Image (tube, coloured by chain):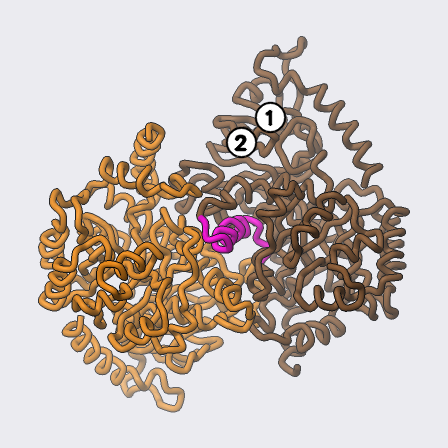
Chain colours: A brown, B orange
């Protein structure tokens, strides 16, 4: 991560310098006429999510290759000779959203055994043992990735088995992804032996080390599903391989009790003691954390993934994210897997996040709309340590952005763009998605994969799962 | 209401008897060949919401005029000679949803002053005084009604000013509506004097008494905004005019405190004391009610409208709906107005309702998917005392139904139809909406009104509101 980040940061600096003139209204166009761009988006309500939270009415964005060349007013359009122009017609252009925690392949189990308490042991474990293989993980991840693009995500952070298949699915759809191979203390669908995921991960990480879209990662499942020795081994391997680490952390009261009983610590303190608590860690959930945990997470620069729909649907509770943000923690939003949250809808998550924190504090003022848009974009990018490349619309960053319809019935009127996004927009209002400079979806049509074929493939699989589930 | 219900119940019985043969697989077709129908929907996953919660795979529905002639398996299609057939292709056909509480015209204020505490006094009251007239109420209600149809509602219960304009908007869109003219203890946009709404309501009720889609109603605003004498007067008028009564009840702690201080009662007990607590009352919110209140509401057969998105976004709390359902109360779902909940999306409300009660009890089992679908359909119909005519798909009932896409990416797979509706469906998955036997929307296209014209008209209005709001 750090090595790659340094290289990328240098590139950002070079590109930013090269294009600075184009974002500065006082500078003239370089002698010799317009600069070239692959795509210019004009007539946009640009929600930059930069440090000043600039919103540019009648704005424009120039994209050259995989990067944003310039962001500014209408003058940007005149300064660039573009191969293609999209007139946004006043629509919102915002950074692509970052789904900081999911298990995309679990689309295959969506809606199975909802509302019952023992679904994990009654349905999921036996069914996973039966049907989870590389092919099915690929098919499930394809459907999940399409669903994420359709609702405005451009990057997702995934944790499951056969993560090389998830990586291939992300590439096929054209999404940016951090994909973490699960390491867990018992045999898994892709490992006959306990902790077999670690060897699997080493092969997988070597294979995907230099991909422009996919960042391979290690995913120790949770503090209570690996022993101490193996958590330490993962920490050493992560430093050696220079990869991100994904974990479920402080998700249930049972976890808190178990770690306290065995080690006399909170799960956060425990992960620190095994060497996992650092800036390469992305910790999902963090529901049951106290002020000391939050301070320790902040000191160690851990990124937090807040999965409120999943946490609430499971009756677990609401993570103290207002306190985390006040402490300066980097918090992003996550859908969790579709068995937990059922959809992979980042846009819908904005409203849940804003409203449920108001409920938790019985105060309509807290968690305002802009803060949830922040977490879904630059906050998520910071949580996964990619904010030097993605998460805001700024010259030099990678061109990951989405166009959101301002003309749908539910988006009228639009007195405040953040309120419209957080409280009124639906996933379907996402019209066009650009990732790494490439148009992945245009006017709701996926351009990279055959969606009908993906649906057919998943249905064949899920018909079989339904048959097996009926016997359980 | 009661008079009309009796007549309607008789009609239901006659029609049910006439069509019984068509819903009974063992009976043969009447001699003389197929019966006639205007529309038959075939190849549907029919979610009847009848007393047995029947779900019919490969089902069919025959519609004759404004009513459902038959509901059953594929044989229904062969028994009817239909003018038109819709092949649902396996899609879900469910009862049209009932939005039991809204202020549809407030679309004009959607997203204005969100996240600030004093928005009502700072923005809404002055802006309402400035722009709310019959014409603007009509335009706002048109946009709101379209949004409701787009998300699967076929009936809405409205409370605002100039309710005759809301009635006209409902008719134009083709929606069923209960529209309550506000009576309040100070001058209002449609009444120069306090309580002027009562005289307005009498005119309006006389004018709309016999409409097949619109039921006029009285809407005393809240226990604390009318004095006791006028609450009593409304109760007498409601019985005299035989109309439903809509009220905001037990919505804030301030209301509880005020009524307790003045009358030594809970707001529920207070409304009973003025004669308003009966089966014609639809009480919105009921957040701060105790076991005695719930028992009194049940005894008096009051319908409750549960508005969880609005209540949560305002930081008010979660109404004890699990306790209400356990007590046998009739509870429906409501979006509240678009200044409160921002959207009028009934489909999205299903997920919020299911998940937030799990959070409130920290138990994933409570408020299962079927219960929220129930509240959105037959529960809402019971709450507004129309369950003899709408709320379920049964022969003899009015043909208010919606077709929901089972093929959208987020709806795959569909192991359980209720879980798919409550946790995965989005408003956009509603494809076709039929109200009173009439196709109001077909494949996402509104057939009754010019949506682009409605948007243009609202934008002219809201541009003006934005200008005025900027000065406040």
Query: Which residue is found at the position 32% from the left and 43% from the top?
Result: B120
The residue that mark 2 highlights is A46
Residue B132 falls in image quadrant: top left
Q: Which region is colored magenta?
A: A342-363
Main secondary structure of the magenta stretch: helix
- Horizontal side of A384 relative to B20 (left or right) equals right
Q: For this rendering, which residue is in front, A131 or A111?
A: A111
User: Label 1 neighbourhood size at 10 Å, few (<14), some (14-19), many (20+)?
Assistant: many
Labels 1 and 2: the sequence-earlier one: 2
Q: Are marks 1 and 2 on the same chain?
A: yes
User: Label 2 neighbourhood size at 10 Å, few (<14), some (14-19), many (20+)?
Assistant: many
Element class at badge 2: strand
Element class at badge 1: strand
Residue A396 falls in image quadrant: top right
Q: Position of residue B182 (x, y in %)?
A: 20, 53
Q: Position of residue A141 (x, y in %)?
A: 69, 57
Query: Which residue is found at the position 56% from the left and 64% from the top?
Result: A313
Q: Position of residue B218 (x, y in %)?
A: 18, 59
| Residue B216 vertical placement versus A449 (above, below) | below
Counting the numbered discs, the total is 2
- Horizontal side of A44 relative to A333 (left or right) equals left
Please say whether residue B64 is visible from this viewpoint.
no
Question: CA gap, disc 1 to disc 2?
Answer: 8 Å
Task: Report if residue A63 lies within the magenta region.
Answer: no
| Residue B242 vertical placement versus A326 (above, below) | below
- Could you tell me if the residues under marks 1 and 2 are in contact, i.e. CB atoms within 8 Å? yes
Chain ID, mark 1: A
The residue that mark 1 highlights is A71
Residue B70 falls in image quadrant: bottom left
Query: Which residue is found at the position 52% from the left and 45% from the top?
Result: A367
Please say whether residue A237 is visible from this viewpoint.
yes
């Amino acid at each position: 991560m750090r090595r790659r980040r340094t290289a990328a940061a240098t590139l950002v600096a070079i590109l930013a310098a090269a294009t600075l003139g184009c974002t500065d209204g006082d500078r003239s166009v370089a002698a010799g006429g317009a600069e070239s761009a692959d795509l210019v988006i004009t007539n946009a309500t640009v929600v930059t999510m930069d440090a000043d939270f600039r919103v540019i009415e009648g704005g424009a964005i120039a994209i050259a290759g995989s990067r944003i060349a310039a962001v500014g007013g209408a003058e940007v359009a005149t300064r660039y000779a573009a191969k293609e122009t999209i007139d946004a017609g006043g629509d919102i252009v915002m950074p692509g959203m970052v789904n900081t925690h999911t298990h995309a392949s679990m689309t295959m189990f969506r809606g199975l055994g909802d509302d019952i308490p023992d679904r994990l042991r009654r349905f999921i474990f036996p069914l996973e043992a039966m049907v989870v293989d590389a092919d099915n993980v690929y098919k499930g991840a394809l459907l999940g990735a399409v669903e994420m693009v359709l609702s405005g995500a451009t990057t997702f952070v995934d944790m499951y088995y056969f993560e090389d298949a998830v990586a291939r699915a992300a590439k096929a759809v054209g999404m940016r992804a951090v994909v973490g191979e699960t390491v867990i203390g018992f045999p898994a669908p892709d490992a006959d032996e306990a902790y077999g995921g670690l060897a699997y991960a080493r092969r997988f990480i070597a294979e995907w080390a230099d991909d422009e879209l996919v960042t391979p990662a290690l995913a120790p499942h949770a503090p209570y599903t690996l022993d101490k020795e193996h958590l330490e081994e993962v920490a050493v391997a992560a430093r050696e391989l220079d990869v991100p680490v994904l974990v479920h952390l402080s998700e249930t009261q049972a976890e808190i009790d178990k770690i306290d009983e065995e080690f006399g610590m909170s799960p956060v303190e425990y992960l620190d003691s095994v060497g996992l608590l650092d800036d390469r860690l992305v910790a999902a959930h963090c529901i049951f954390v106290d002020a000391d945990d939050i301070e320790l997470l902040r000191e160690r620069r851990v990124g937090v993934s807040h999965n409120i729909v999943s946490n609430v649907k499971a009756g677990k509770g609401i993570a103290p994210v207002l306190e985390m943000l006040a402490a300066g923690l980097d918090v992003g939003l996550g859908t969790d897997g579709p068995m937990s949250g059922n959809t992979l809808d980042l846009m819908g998550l904005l409203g849940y996040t804003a409203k449920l924190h108001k409920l938790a504090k019985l105060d309509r003022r807290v968690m305002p709309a802009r803060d949830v848009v922040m977490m879904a974009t630059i906050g998520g990018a910071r949580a996964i340590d990619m904010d030097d490349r993605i998460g805001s619309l700024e010259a030099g960053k990678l061109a990951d952005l989405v166009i959101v319809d301002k003309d749908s019935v539910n988006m009228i009127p639009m007195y405040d763009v953040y309120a419209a996004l957080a409280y009124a927009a639906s996933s379907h209002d996402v019209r066009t998605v650009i990732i790494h400079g490439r148009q992945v979806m245009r006017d709701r049509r996926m351009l990279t994969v055959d969606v009908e074929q993906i649906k057919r493939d998943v249905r064949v699989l899920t018909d079989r799962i339904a048959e097996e589930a009926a016997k359980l």
